[in-house]
Amino acid sequence: MSDLEKGPEPREPRRGTPHDPDAEHVDVLDPDAVGGEDAAKQVQASMAAADRPGGPLDLSVYLPTAKVTAGAILIALVIGAVLIAISDDGVIESLSYFTSYPWDFFTRSGDAIWSAYSALVRGSVGSGAAISTTLERSAPLICAGLSVALAFRAGLFNIGGQGQLTIGALCAGYVGFTWDLPSGVHVVAAALAGILGGAVWGGIVGLLKARTGAHEVITTIMFNYIAVAVLTYALSKDAFQRPGSDNPQSLPVADSARLPEIFGVHIGVLLAFLAAGLVWWILERSTLGFELRAVGANADASRTAGMSIPKVYTLAMLLAGALAGLASLSGVLGRGDSLSLSVVGSTGFDAITVALLGRATPLGTVLAGLLFGAMSVGGGAMEAAGTPRELTDVLQALIVLFVAAPALVKGLMRVKESGGGATVMAKGWGS
Amino acid sequence: MGIVSLLDKTAEPGGPAPSSGTGPQVRDRADVRRQRRLIVVFGIVALLVGYFYLDIDDFEIQYSLAERITKEDRPQPWDTQLMMIVCLVVVVVSLVLALVNRVPRNAWAGVLFVLVGVAFLAAFIIWNFTDQDGAVARTFFNPLPEAMRRSTPLVLGALAGVLCERAGVINIAIEGQFIAGAFFAAVASSLAYSAEMGLVGGIIAGVGIAAMLGVFAMRYHVNQVVLGVVLVAFATGFTSFLLKQIPSDPDIRQYLNAPLILERIAIPGLSDIPVIGLTFFNQTLLVYIMYVSIGLVTFLLYQTKWGLRVRSVGEHPKAADTVGIKVNRVRWQAVLLGGVFAGLGGAFFTVGSNGTFDNGVSANYGFIALAAVIMGRWHPVGGTLAALFFGFMLTIEVQLGQLDRIPPAFIQAMPYIATVIAVAGFVGRVRPPAADGEPYVKS
């Protein structure tokens, strides 16, 4: 099957008629009917069906996708505006005399919506400081999103970002505040420890899946809880516990283990973009990436074509865990957070929505990570303007929901165009 | 390589090899692998139980059939040495059976596994309670009533998941249904000043999320794994947004987030049976609803025409369509009915237990319910058993967490480690309904 391993696979011509929502669900061939000869063809056909048509540099291909995404964001913002309006005291007050003086209702709603959304924008990209905060907030989302995206491409659903981040932070933090190394070496050692910790935590799940068939959705959920228990245990030990404190909290890492800054942001941001490039290279240009996508598209055909499914599952989860470990560095080594039970926040779960919005592609994940990072930072400013920051969570969920339902968005926006919105994801429970 | 040579010895004729013909018998590779796995697992269990036995200095503990110390139920002393020996014997006998490859292959295998599991758990619990300072610390209270309560949302959530997935719609959004159910149960109960109305509020919210699941999965063909995660995020964000909008002014709060809590109802006669009565028949209305739901879902799925249709659209929608079953209509019915159970499960977290809604009140139980669906192999009874197992482990965790035999963090992780072992060691590869997660489009 050497021809399998050679470079760019043939792509199917652009297909799909207008309103062909089923396009991504076509099973290319019955997996049971795979013969050895046809296996290679079938793998390629599956992958062609899964991939977006056209080359990666053909920008017009992205246009429908971009339109659907923009439409989804717009619809989500409209729903958000309604929520802002009905939750504003002034607006509710004006409703009581709506029939006699409706104008008040509209001006007050307009004011409330404008102040909330302008605060959201101002707080996230309104100033240089805001932009660097946004970038630093986005970096872990991008890395963790890449982790979920990479696993998705192999047909695995990695809900375990949370646990992998936790263990990554634990390892990076431990090296960061206990070891005594020269400054350049220290930060590298701490970063490697974090990445390794995440990789091991993810790799165990991959190994269990490969060896015993234990479903990764269950095991990653369970490993999230176990990771929290490990962190709790570590924080109850003298090696981690901050002296003179009763809270389960460690010291911040030594200055020599902090990520250096460039252009006003810590280097974790740069690492996130580099990681995106690396993931793109792995997925699109390497043999491993080809196998990964092949297994994700059709595991039965890939097995028949001679690929080792256990190897692919293990490596995919190992890489996904390493990326999650990379994501954990932003907090401990970047911002200099001390280890505590809330050290990773909800980054691991948010990363799933980031990867989904990014359609499990590296570029998409970067853009989605930047958007969600900006919303998360802007949410604080919005709360100061009187609207709860939880609104951004609702907005994020709605955006992903609408992006995943291109037919709905096109219907609402009256776009009559084919293509756009084929989400390539784990189809079902897998096997 | 001691095991390998041992395996060869057992391969001699006379062993209960799968093929019972005459002549030289060749052992199946799968059979060897099975035996090796059993030896490893039983060996580890036997070593641990043996260690527990040797580690205990004073076998005296106390037990109480009640959940706390009451006047009529004083804790009784209990010499656990005999119990420990029984556990040890069970485990060692199983290990010997595995060594000579005589572990049964039929239903008795299940019984044996359960026996080993129970023996290990009992030994572990006893080991935790012995050698503690103070009589109260040595007292093991009956965990079953609490376990039954904790299992309630898990069982209801698992039933919801089973219903949806047997119909071919993946439901990862159980957690979202729990959160929404919990919130709106609290609001409904506070508004109506009635705990039972809270259940209605929970049902409405659960069905609401189920309707979103249905619309996006069946009308817009959204990838259902994606959809479930997004719905959880939506429910979390939406309820916490609304919660912040409820003013902290107590006069207003009491109308929105100060629900009444369901009262315990002792069933006359049945609740007087020792242990069983306290466990099963002195619970809230929601727990009784849970019992009925298990039977109802099992009956509906396996004894009615509708259930056959649900299962067929989950396995092979095209075939079902060919014989005139309206695939999406049946799926809608299953998803919405699932929403009822999941919403009731959500109501447990407010009107069924603590009352006030707060962020994170459902403690990710929805994901545990999802794990129960998969561990129970998409069967209502299997899912229920898995959910009961989780409920029991989560209860034990609370009691053992206060003792100092092993670090509390380990106890905290125990239910999850047990799940990983169960899933990786015994459940293994599971087969979901064939058309699970695939939208059906008539061609």
Image (cartoon, grey):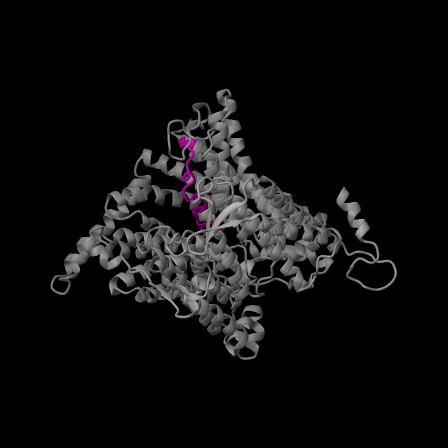
Q: Position of residue A191 (x, y in %)?
A: 51, 31
Q: Quadrant of the C terminus of chain A?
A: bottom right
- Asked whether residue A385 is in view, the answer is yes
Closer to us: A393 or B257: B257
Closer to us: B214 or B232: B232
Extent of the magenta region: A334-362
For residue B278, side relative to residue B3 (left or right): left
Residue A341 sits inside the magenta stretch: yes
The vertical placement of B333 against B61, above or below, is below
Closer to us: A330 or B344: B344
Point out the residue furthest to the top here. Answer: A182
For residue B125, side relative to residue A10 (left or right): left
**What residue is rendered at 47% in x and 72% in y?**
B296
The vertical placement of A177 against B61, above or below, is above
- Asked whether residue A279 is in view, the answer is no
Q: Position of residue B242 (x, y in %)?
A: 29, 54
Point out the residue furthest to the right here. Answer: B23
The vertical placement of A324 against A108, above or below, is above
Q: Position of residue A20 (x, y in %)?
A: 49, 65
Closer to us: A128 or B93: B93
Residue A76 figure quarter:
bottom left
Residue B48 figure quarter:
top right
**What residue is rendered at 37% in x and 38% in y?**
A134
